[in-house]
Amino acid sequence: MLCPCGCGESLYTNLMDDFDPYWKYVIEEKTISLKPSIDRLVGCKSHFFLTHGKIIWC
């Protein structure tokens, strides 16, 4: 997905629990949630949750 801050960077989230770090996802009522939060340590340094398809900024 593209970073929601608008910087244009692609974000990759590992969903395979065999490799760290990884994110768990839940699909409910046609929306997706990811846990834990996404915390960019470089670039724009955005930090947010994706909850029920919405960005919740930290």
Image (cartoon, helix red, strand yellow):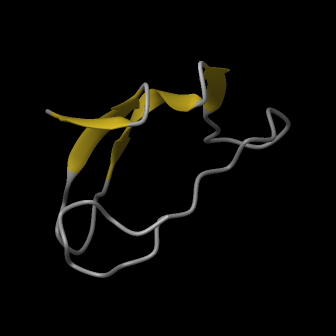
In this view, 53 is above or below 36: below
The image quarter containing residue 24 is: top right
- Quarter that holds the C terminus: top left
What residue sits 50% from the left and 64% below the top?
A: 1
Q: Residue furthest right?
A: 18
Depth check: give the residue in front, 19 or 51: 51
Residue 5: horizontal and vertical position, in percent? 18, 63
What residue sits 42% from the left and 35% below the top?
A: 53
The image quarter containing residue 55 is: top left
Q: Is residue 8 left or right of residue 7?
A: right
Residue 12: horizontal and vertical position, in percent? 56, 62
Q: Is residue 25 left or right of residue 45?
A: right
What residue sits 30% from the left and 82% below the top?
A: 8
In this view, 41 is above or below 51: below
Residue 10: horizontal and vertical position, in percent? 45, 75
In this view, 45 is above or below 31: below
Q: Residue furthest front?
A: 29
The image quarter containing residue 41 is: bottom left
Depth check: give the residue in front, 33 or 44: 33
Depth check: give the residue in front, 55 or 21: 55
